[in-house]
Image (cartoon, rainbow, N blue to C red):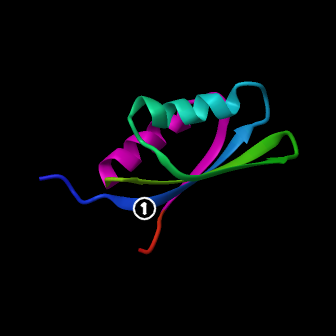
């Protein structure tokens, strides 16, 4: 039996270059995960991408491991919403 889905927020420090947002969002699209919200804010040479989504804990961890392998991702933090 799989664990129930939970809401998550992924905060991603991405390199500010063409295709960074596409690379990040493709990871979610390839696994059939929709966003509840997405924001992208430019900072010094980087961009902060914040994505809220619903997934099982296992799938959320898989998404993070995949995102961390992307060359455009400098750092990533995953938090469960509501504990």
Q: How many labels sit on residues? A: 1
- Residue 4: image x %, image y %? 25, 60
Determine the secondary structure under disc 1: strand
Classify residue 1 as left or right of residue 71. left
- Magenta highlight range: 57-79
Q: Position of residue 34 (x, y in %)?
A: 46, 44
Whether 45 is among the magenta residues is: no
Indicate whether 21 appears above or below 56. above
**Residue at the image point whose x is 47% and y is 68% from the top:** 81
Out of 68 and 29, give the one closest to the viewer.
Answer: 29
Vertical position of residue 3 compared to residue 32: above or below: below
Q: Quadrant of the C terminus?
A: bottom left
Q: Is residue 74 magenta?
A: yes
| Residue visible at 49% across and 33% down in the picture | 27
- Residue situated in front as seen by the camera: 78 or 50: 50
Q: Where residue 55 sits: x, y (%)?
A: 36, 52
Q: In this rendered view, identify the residue nearer to me: 70 or 24.
A: 24
Q: Is residue 34 left or right of residue 5?
A: right
Q: Residue furthest left?
A: 1
Name the residue tied to disc 1: 7
Above or below for 14 versus 83:
above
Q: Is residue 63 left or right of residue 72?
A: left
Q: Residue at x 88, y 45 (%)?
A: 44
> In the rendering, at what x and y percent does residue 50 appear?
63, 52
As drawn, the residue found furthest toward the right would be: 44
Mark 1 crowdedness (10 Å alpha carbons): few <14, some 14-19, many ≥20: some
């Amino acid at each position: 039996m799989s664990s129930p889905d939970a809401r998550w927020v992924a905060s991603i420090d991405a390199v500010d270059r063409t295709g960074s947002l596409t690379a990040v969002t493709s990871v979610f699209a390839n696994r059939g995960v929709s966003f509840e919200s997405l924001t992208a804010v430019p900072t010094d040479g980087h961009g902060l991408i914040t994505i809220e989504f619903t997934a099982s804990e296992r799938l959320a961890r898989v998404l993070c491991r995949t995102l961390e392998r992307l060359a455009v991702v400098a750092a990533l933090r995953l938090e469960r919403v509501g504990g």
